Image (cartoon, rainbow, N blue to C red):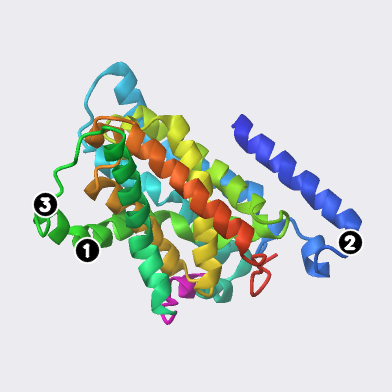
Amino acid sequence: MLFLGSIVTLYNHTVTVNDERGSMQPAHSRTSHSVNGIPLPLYLLVSFGGAWLIWLPLLIAEYLRFSLPVPSVVFITLGSFAPSVVALLLTWRYAGGTELRQLLARALVWRVSPIWYLLAIFGPAMVMLLAMGGHIVLGGTVPDYVPFGPRWLIVAVNIVLVFFIGGPLGEEFGWRGVVLPALEARFSPPWESLILGIIWTVWHLPLFFISASAQHSLPFWLFALLTMPLCILITWVYHGSGESLLLVMLFHAAVNTWSGVLKISPEAAGSTRPLALAVLLTWVVALLIAGGRKRFTPKRSLL
């Protein structure tokens, strides 16, 4: 938990600096170290601890080389719900039913411009296709993409399944519902998103040692380099869509789904180059957005 200690120290130091500056934050923000009364260090500790505790039997089984009576995917899926479950429980505990309903309601914000749906669902696919194109130009093998084949017909079904059990629903009430607003109150863009990207990366760490997980075949350094620009893009979608957690979850689901359909992973592509190019392109897009947009300004402060 050394990482969590570092984050807490950095966060508390920034709180102190902002408190000294006074005018940088609204009065109610300057005196609070929490989101809706939830201490951020407590949220991180419980969400990390909850997920890692659920995944612990899989790590032990991998190390001691024995099989568990329950499929690994059950443990992986249950652990992936820790960020959202902890966010909802702590919101109810510290802020009450009204704030809990408001947090849940953000997952039902669907009346947004169609452009945000297109960006959330097809934006990741465009980046991955460009990356795969670059891989082919550099001499890589052409994937067996079959127009209108089974892989394409089930994309919509896959996105729905991934949305509910592949991470987005289980994580985003926490990452974007609780952690992002807390970091936005203390750090300037895009630093809040980059810090969240580091938190998000480290939370996934045990999965890299579990053979049944999607992360097992990924180089950790590429995954880490990908999550940070992804967080910048997700923050952009989050605020552009009026703080819609629904759009954030769709974006998250699209990234996970298209990476499998378009065979961008090293295991599917037979090379790390497609993923490396996708990481590079994601950074380019994220930096263009971070540099060319106006400052992300939350519509309301949760601190």
Picture layout, residue 102 above or below residue 290: below
Label 2: which residue? 22
Foreground: disc 3 or disc 1: 3
Of mark 1 and mark 2, the one earlier in the sequence is: 2
Q: Residues within 10 Å of mark 1 (few under 14, many from 20)?
A: few
Q: Secondary structure at mark 3?
A: loop
Q: Residues within 10 Å of mark 3 (few under 14, many from 20)?
A: few
Q: State which quadrant residue 298 falls in.
A: bottom right
Which image quarter is the N terminus in? Answer: top right
Residue 89 seen by the camera = no
Left or right, 186 with respect to 84, comes to right
Of mark 2 and mark 3, the one earlier in the sequence is: 2
Left or right, 110 with respect to 58, comes to right
Query: Which one is in front, 11 or 34?
Result: 11
Label 3: which residue? 146
- The Cα atoms of the two marked residues, 2 and 3, are separated by 59 Å
Instruction: Say which mark, if any, is on residue 221.
Output: none
Question: Which residues are drawn in magenta?
Answer: 103-112
Image location of residue 212, percent across then percent down: 26, 34
**Amino acid type, callout 3:** Val
Image location of residue 115, percent across then percent down: 41, 74
- The Cα atoms of the two marked residues, 3 and 1, are separated by 16 Å
Residue at 51 percent across and 49 percent down: it is 284
- The Cα atoms of the two marked residues, 1 and 2, are separated by 49 Å
Image location of residue 172, percent across then percent down: 46, 58
Of mark 3 and mark 1, the one earlier in the sequence is: 3
Residue 27 seen by the camera = yes
Foreground: disc 2 or disc 3: 3
Q: Secondary structure at mark 1?
A: helix
Residue at 30 percent across and 47 percent down: it is 259
